[in-house]
Image (spheres, rainbow, N blue to C red):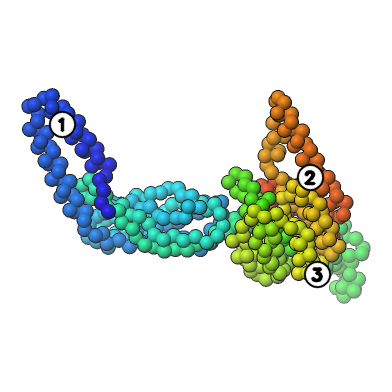
Amino acid sequence: MIFPSKPHIALWLGLGAVGCMASYLPETAFFWRMLTGLAVGCALLDSFSSLRRPLLSVERTVHHNLPVSAWSRISLNIVNEGGHSLSLQLHDHCDADIRIRHQPCSVILPPNGKACVSYEVYPTRRGQFNFPGLDVFIDSPLRLWQKKSFLPCISETKVFPNFRKIRHYALLATHHNLSLMGIKRLTRRGEGNEFHQLREYRQGDSLQKIDWKATSRYRRLISKEYQDERDQQIIFVLDCGRRMHHAESGRSHLDQALSSILLLAHVAARQGDSVGFYSFGGTQKWVPPQKTENSVRTLLLAMYDLKSSTAASDYLRTARDLLALQTRRSLMVIVTGSRAEDHDDLLQMARQLRRRHLLVVADLREKILDETMQTPVAGFNGALRYQALQHYLGEREALLKQLRHHGIYTLDVTAEHLPPALVNSYLEIKSSGSL
């Protein structure tokens, strides 16, 4: 497809203006006709030059795994296999759920030359995406025409929960700066109950830690060193019902919960624990707890296509299913977003599971609630809004008190503060030896 370029349109607009002047100045009419004839000749000659088929090849470089709600770079390698210089623009085809910036990409290719251009994509949902090809707009030699061509270049990629928090955590852990993520270093209330190693006695060690057999053998004081128990099981229970469809800052509660779960799964796997996953309310999936090098990757593959549904979550059925699926005592981390009409079922579910497992219930709170509480009350409508909000928060606090009364750990946080809150709760439980 060939169409006039912006300089071509500007040329004819200029000639039209000159023609208007020539109608008032007859002596310039001959000059205007010469310019018009010259422009027509150049346009026809330039159009014939642009009819030749360009010899182009393109290769796209895109990662097979992309994080959701994060910018990622995609590269395009263009090769001009012809003997003529080409000035062109590239526009890659993407799915409607992917935002794009730095497109179209402009490049000038010399004869038999090549170039690499890049742009960035921002997937707004998880799942599998295809890149079918790209549009190429080639300028004619005189820049009067543009030829549009489609170059097929098929690529596939999967968009996963945002796993970059794991990389960020690992980097901060290496530099001992986990406080930047809000993760606290807990002071131990006691000693772990799993033997780790023998070491020389240090000042301040209790007498109970001294290994007298090793002391007599080496003829110097030897102490026992313990560590937190390993080989424990962590089950992540994620609500995929209609409550988790709520979005803040362009990200749904479900996506933010998945990122938080992946981070805690990485931490738990590094602590030597097994991690499993169960989703309910929308897509129901069960990944039994496993302790392997690829346990976090297994969870990632199971989570990438989860979607929140419009159905109400069945907490009681979930409790029955989990008690049948997971018989060994474990730490169950339940992530949900409840309302007043859900509180009785959520409480009953937690009480049933608490008989066999240790529970952490993370009930996500909407960010707008905090913002509204900080807004000054103005007028009668503002007072009504404030009173309704106080009543709603009071119901949430009553539920959390009941859960804590049954020995259940609770988290009442916004989705953006969920990652450090989950990790801190896990580390506190490991340190206390409650599991």
For the residues labelled 2 and 1, say whether their Cβ atoms are less than 8 Å apart. no
Confirm whether residue 181 shows in the render: no
Say few, some or many: other residues with alpha carbon within 10 Å of mark 2 (under 14 / 14 to 19 / 20 or more): some
Q: Amino acid at mark 1?
A: Gly
Local SS, label 2:
helix
- In this rendering, which labeled residue sits more in front, label 3 or label 2? 2
Local SS, label 1:
helix
Return the residue at label 2. 396
Measure the C-alpha gap from mark 3 to mark 2: 31 Å
The disc, 2 or 1, on the residue closer to the chain's N-terminal end is 1
Measure the C-alpha gap from mark 3 to mark 1: 90 Å
Return the residue at label 1. 19
Quadrant of the image containing the C terminus: bottom right
- Residue at 39% x, 58% y: name it: 76
**Horizontal relation, residue 96 to residue 199: left or right:** left
Q: Amino acid at mark 3?
A: Arg
- Residue at 68% x, 48% y: name it: 415
Q: Say above or below: 92 vs 383.
A: below
Percent coordinates x, y for residue 398 in the rendering: 83, 45
